[in-house]
Image (tube, rainbow, N blue to C red):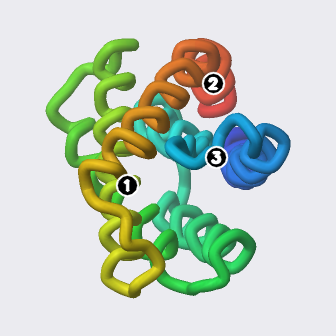
């Protein structure tokens, strides 16, 4: 019995994507975060979404919880938001996946829906706990829009390489 390589590549890629998100935010902080603009890189969500469509991952919810907890501990210092949101997004992606045949456009639209929902829920959590007082209109124009645009560009660049890696590793 042959063991699929995705068993090793998936968690490694997921955590690399997570730390690349932080690294990009740090390196390009002057461009990503200004007085009127905030761009959030979501490479780890790209990895999660692509795995739903193109890989056979063992224990995906375990890895979603692990990456969410790591993000909370490493980047936010509060255990909870990502710990809850990443598995929720994985679940919703799997539900949406069941209705569609994978294609570039379908995966792109589901990825953008996931980012929008994830970012909006994270905003609401921050409003509830008093970490932000930014209005919804300002949030949509200053964070959600730029975040979707940035991640759309990243998706277009990384779609084929990630799809190929996942399909090849799942055999």
Q: CA distance from mark 1 to mark 2?
A: 21 Å
Which residue is located at x 50 percent, y 58 percent? 60
Which residue is located at x 40 percent, y 65 percent? 122
On the image, the x and y values in percent for residue 104 come to 39, 13
Looking at the image, is mark 2 or mark 3 earlier in the sequence? 3
Q: CA distance from mark 3 to mark 1?
A: 19 Å
Q: Which residue is mark 3?
A: 33
On the image, the x and y values in percent for residue 12 come to 77, 50
Q: Nearer the viewer, mark 3 or mark 1?
A: 3
Looking at the image, is mark 3 or mark 1 earlier in the sequence? 3
Verify CB contact (< 8 Å) between mark 3 and mark 1: no
Which quarter of the figure has residue 121?
A: bottom left
In the displayed structure, 42 sits above or below 79; it is above
The quadrant of the image that shows the C terminus is top right
What secondary structure is found at the residue carrying circle 1? helix
Which residue is located at x 48 percent, y 29 percent? 54
Q: Nearer the viewer, mark 1 or mark 2?
A: 1
On the image, the x and y values in percent for residue 29 come to 75, 45
Verify CB contact (< 8 Å) between mark 1 and mark 2: no
In the displayed structure, 108 sits above or below 12; it is above
In the displayed structure, 31 sits above or below 154; it is below
Q: Which residue is mark 2?
A: 162
Q: Which residue is mark 1?
A: 118
Which quarter of the figure has residue 34?
A: top right
Q: How crowded is the residue under tag 1: few (<14 C-alpha within 10 Å), some, or many (20+)? A: many
Residue situated in front as seen by the camera: 67 or 53:
67
């Amino acid at each position: 019995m042959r063991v699929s390589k995705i068993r090793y590549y998936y968690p490694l890629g997921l955590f690399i994507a997570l730390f690349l998100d932080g690294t990009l935010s740090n390196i390009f902080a002057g461009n990503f975060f200004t007085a009127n603009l905030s761009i959030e890189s979501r490479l780890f969500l790209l990895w999660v979404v692509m795995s739903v469509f193109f890989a056979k991952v063992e224990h995906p919810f375990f890895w979603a919880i692990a990456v969410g907890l790591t993000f909370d501990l490493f980047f936010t210092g509060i255990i909870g938001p990502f710990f809850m949101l990443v598995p929720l997004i994985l679940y919703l992606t799997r539900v949406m996946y069941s209705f569609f045949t994978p294609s570039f456009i379908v995966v792109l639209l589901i990825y953008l829906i996931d980012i929008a929902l994830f970012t909006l829920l994270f905003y609401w959590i921050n409003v509830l706990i008093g970490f932000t007082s930014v209005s919804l209109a300002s949030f949509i124009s200053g964070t959600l829009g730029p975040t979707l645009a940035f991640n759309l560009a990243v998706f277009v660049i990384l779609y084929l390489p990630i799809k190929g890696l996942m399909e090849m590793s799942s055999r």
